[in-house]
Amino acid sequence: MLDFYAVPNARTPAPLVIFVHGGGWKHGSKDVAASRYAPAHFTQMGYAYAAINYRLIPAATVEQQGEDIALALRALLARAEQLGIDRSRVVLMGHSAGAHLVALVGTDERYLKSAGLSFADIRGVIPNDGASYDVPRQMEQSGDFMRDTYLQAFGTDLARQRALSPVMQAAAPNAPAFLLLHVQRPDGIAQAKELEMALKRAGTAVERRDFPGTGLRGHSEINRQLGNPDYAATPVVDAWLRRVFGTETVTPLKR
């Protein structure tokens, strides 16, 4: 299931931003865990926007969630002409558990390949305030907080935990470009820095930007407020998308 927002009165195919919600891999949906600003903001910028659902644990595995993201992308690209999408310009964006999932899909090509796609089908990835890019380290350092959630998602098999860690899948090839966003949560900072370094070692273009906010409130705010022009992360994301999509000279549509 997904919600799709087309660019109003578009005369040419539009780039596409796909949002993947968070919720600890076991909660959440496109209806309750996405920014209320995002649909109007991104379509006003000239980009089509889609917010997708994926199967949740324990009914599905994290591996199947990665496949669901690839299947949603395939479904949208298969309808590119009908929906007015430029299938050569797609960015995946996710928050929290969704940040982990888009980072995983952007570093381990098997998920895209399972849907008949490849890294050539995406221009970039925006993981927003995730903290499970290195799953074993996150599980080791998290203490009691989120321990049960991590165990339910990633289990106790170290080989599986490593296979589900974007940091450990980030050897080339990867998606072409990454923008890592985070607030001032110690684990989020450490994990984003680790993923940044892994991507740099692979020669992948990566930027990391941090913003005010602490604890769960800051973690929620960077998702809920994204697309609000008065929120600090919005112009950063906008500028990055313009570079990645090659729309730097395009004037945003009037509301």
Image (cartoon, rainbow, N blue to C red):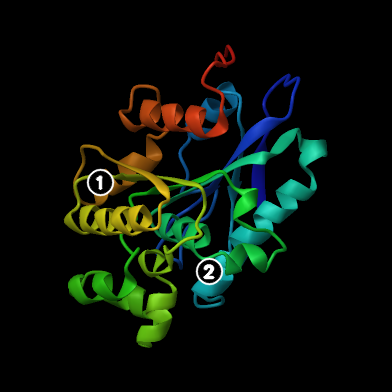
Q: Which residue: 54% across, 50% down? A: 30
Q: Quadrant of residue 229?
A: top left
Position of residue 63 relative to residue 249, above or below, is below
Position of residue 5 relative to residue 214, above or below, is above
Q: How many marks?
A: 2
Q: Is residue 154 visible?
A: no
> Is label 2 in a helix, a strand or a loop?
loop
**What quarter of the picture does the C terminus occupy?**
top right
Is disc 1 surrounded by few (<14), some (14 to 19) or many (20+) residues within 10 Å?
few
- Disc 2 marks a residue whose amino acid type is Leu
Circle 1 residue: 217
Question: Which dot marks residue 53?
Answer: none
Nearer to us in this view, 90 or 139: 90
Nearer to us in this view, 207 or 157: 207
Circle 2 residue: 56
* Residue located farthest toward the right when viewing the structure as drawn: 82
Q: Which residue: 41% across, 64% down? A: 166
Q: Which residue: 69% across, 22% down? A: 8
Position of residue 108 relative to residue 2, above or below, is below
Question: Earlier along the polypeptide chain: callout 1 or callout 2?
Answer: 2
Is disc 2 surrounded by few (<14), some (14 to 19) or many (20+) residues within 10 Å?
some
Position of residue 196 relative to residue 159, above or below, is above
Image x and y of residue 39, in percent: 56, 33
Nearer to us in this view, 147 or 102: 102
Image x and y of residue 160, in percent: 43, 82
**What is the CA distance from the residue labelled 1 to the residue labelled 2?**
23 Å
Q: Which residue: 34% across, 32% down? A: 233
